[in-house]
């Protein structure tokens, strides 16, 4: 089972590469080999796991309400499917000799990078328009007197608002769990660095299979 989704940004956003451009820019965005922006699958996975946990916790305030909201199943059943999909790390597991040992299980779900739609990628690369996808913003620390702190100026590269598409593959074969994952995607409203400063405001939505097939034919 899989989910295809679109993430549309309403503001500039920054998914960092961990690299800088010397004295010019302190933080660069992550780009693929063609210089195009993308959101790493691990970033989507982390945000989605947090959103799923929040939704399950909200729905389990009352056990009877929880069963109704989760399609008649208990919160424990939902959490079991979450661990199956995302994997888990348990530092409290015990070995055969009774000593604590960490246990890590890899999840079955695979989170692809979210990228620009294929036709847009091809057009941008063909015409060499990659530089127009980015701009640089600056910020500095201000002291109690309203004066800029020395050596606090930072320049960050950001990606302009755009829409990207991604896929989540090999989910547990459970329609109700898939719906929970779609709800969790819609729960995510900001992504990337400096979210508290207005960057990365976004909205996720599912791409119906029929719509995806139509796009490919066109």
Image (cartoon, rainbow, N blue to C red):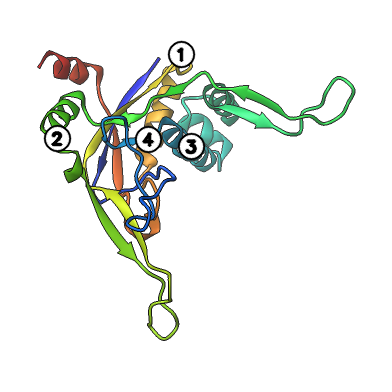
Q: Earlier in the sequence, mark 4 or mark 2?
A: 2
Q: Secondary structure beneath disc 3? A: helix
Tell me residue 75's x, y (percent). 57, 31
Residue 122: mark in rendering: none
Residue 173: mark in rendering: 1
- What residue is drawn where x is 44% and y is 45%? 18
Distance CA(mark 4)–CA(mark 2): 32 Å
Does the residue at mark 4 contact the one at mark 2 (Cβ under 8 Å)? no
Residue 128: mark in rendering: 2
Q: Is residue 97 above or below residue 194?
A: above
Crowd class of label 2 (few under 14; some 14 to 19; many from 20; radius 10 Å): few
Tell us which disc is closer to us: 4 or 3. Answer: 3
**Along the horizontal axis of the image, is 129 left or right of 4?**
left
Q: Quadrant of residue 2?
A: top left
- What residue is drawn where x is 14% and y is 38%? 129
Q: Is residue 72 above or below residue 133?
A: above
Q: Quadrant of the C terminus?
A: top left
Q: Earlier in the sequence, mark 1 or mark 2?
A: 2
Distance CA(mark 1)–CA(mark 2): 42 Å
Distance CA(mark 3)–CA(mark 1): 21 Å
Q: Secondary structure beneath disc 2? A: loop
Distance CA(mark 4)–CA(mark 3): 11 Å
Q: Looking at the picture, tell me which residue is in the foreground, 182 or 18.
A: 18
Tell us which disc is closer to us: 4 or 2. Answer: 2
């Amino acid at each position: 089972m899989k989910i295809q989704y679109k993430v549309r940004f309403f503001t500039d956003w920054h998914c960092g590469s961990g690299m800088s451009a010397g004295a010019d820019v302190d933080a660069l965005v992550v780009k693929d080999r063609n210089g195009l922006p993308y959101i790493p699958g691990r970033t989507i996975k982390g945000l989605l796991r947090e959103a799923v946990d929040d939704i399950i916790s909200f729905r389990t305030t009352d056990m009877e309400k929880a069963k109704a909201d989760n399609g008649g199943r208990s919160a424990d059943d939902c959490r079991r499917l979450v661990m199956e999909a995302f994997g888990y790390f348990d530092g409290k597991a015990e070995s055969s000799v009774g000593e604590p040992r960490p246990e890590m299980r890899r999840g079955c779900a695979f989170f692809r990078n979210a990228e620009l739609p294929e036709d847009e990628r091809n057009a941008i690369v063909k015409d060499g328009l990659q530089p127009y996808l980015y701009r640089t913003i600056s910020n500095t620390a201000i002291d109690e007197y309203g004066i800029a702190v020395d050596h606090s100026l930072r320049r960050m590269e950001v990606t302009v608002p755009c829409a990207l598409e991604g896929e989540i593959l090999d989910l547990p074969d459970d329609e109700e769990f898939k719906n929970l994952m779609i709800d969790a995607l819609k729960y995510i409203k900001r992504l990337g660095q400096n979210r508290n400063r207005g960057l990365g405001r976004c909205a996720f939505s599912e791409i119906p299979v029929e719509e995806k097939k139509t796009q490919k034919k066109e």
